[in-house]
Amino acid sequence: MNTNKTLSMKNIFTKYAALVIQYRLAVVIVTALITCLALFQAKNIKLIIDMNATLPQSHPYISTTNDVEAIFGSKYVVVVGISPKSGEIYTPAIIDKAKRISAALEKTPGILADNMASITARRAKTISSSAEGIEVRALAEKGPTTQAQADALRVAVNKNPVFMDGVVAKDGKTISVIAEFKEPPKGFRSILDAVNALVEAERDANTRINVGGLPSYLAAIEHYSERMALLLPIAIVVLSLILFAGFRTRQGPVLPLITAMVAVIWGVGVMGAFGIPLDVFNATTPILILAVATGHAVQMLKRFYEEYERLRSGNACAPEVANKRAVVTSLVQVGPVMIAAGVVASLGFFSLIIFEISTVRTFGIFTGIGIFGCTYSGNDPDSSRALHA
């Protein structure tokens, strides 16, 4: 029973290999057309850093945080900290810096100006009592021009503890400007570029100015994630060198990498077609697909070389005949194993779609499609024959 099944499987792969060799031009054209279509769709893919995509949204901590942010805001907050290298912040020079930064931030696109927090902001008020009642006035509407006015501002701030450890350090060494932004359509680096530009104008030898907050973190993630454009070519070069060292032939590096690149393009193309974005978790997935696909293709190519050398030993077969027979034999022997391994690996990654975390689901879909694509292209016997003939 098992022997009959084995023979039947070999017959199927033998017929498949013979058909592909017979219609090799059509196979190459169809594969190239699918790859071009996927490459066209890949232009739609975007890198989107969304912290919610990395968190389980049904968790009570996450859902509560989302509710609080929806009601009160304060999600994408940038903090600009200003510290003199000597002395305290209560000097006309330091307060003027904070005031200029606050004024410039209010004009930055995407800012929620009414939510800005700083002792120099328009909404920063000091409340005091007088013989006539309660007096409310701007805390630093014009900014101090003399040290005496700066000292008076210190007294006013100390009388309003709401400013302490929020926008002013208790030790008087740091003053901060806190600005909230809307979610940027062009990425978080657009926020940081604007903030850093206006902050850079205020830096000098006597003052330290630091920029922090969630947008700073997300902008850094965007920057490092986009390094894939550099890392992927480096990975290709490294794999090429390894393959050449292993095979010592021209097609040794070329054929496995063609298979791998087709798999990467198909995976990225499907994501682009369905509008699935790249994110911080799966930005390096193309390298994973590249490595897995190259490994599958190497197995097929190595077996092809072994069969070709066996058939050519003693000039038993002409090169053309040995070439075709080696393609068929290598596919029959290795093809079923590769397909089984590729399908199991693809299904394993596809199983990640049951995860609640969005970025994990994207990773599973992306990687599964890529590995499934390499299972198809890696078992194309014509790819070995085309360059060896």
Image (spheres, grey):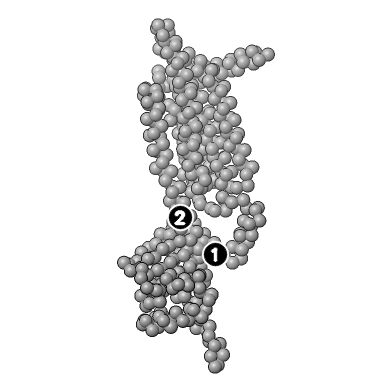
Query: Which residue has dot 1 on it?
Result: 74
Q: Residue 324: image x %, image y %?
A: 46, 15
Cα–Cα gap, marks 1 and 2: 17 Å
Does residue 78 appear to the left or right of 345 in the view shown? Answer: left
Question: In this figure, what is the number of numbered marks?
Answer: 2
Q: Quadrant of residue 6?
A: top right
Query: Which residue has dot 2 on it?
Result: 219
Asked whether residue 116 is in view, the answer is: no
Q: Residue 106: image x %, image y %?
A: 45, 70
Instruction: Please determine whether, in this image, residue 290 is positioned above or below residue 308.
Output: below
Q: Quadrant of residue 248?
A: top left
Q: Quadrant of residue 152?
A: bottom left
Asked whether residue 66 is in view, the answer is: yes
Residue appearing at x 50%, y 27% in the figure = 296
Q: Amino acid at mark 2?
A: Ala
Q: Label 2 neighbourhood size at 10 Å, few (<14), some (14-19), many (20+)?
A: some
Does residue 24 appear to the left or right of 202 in the view shown? Answer: right
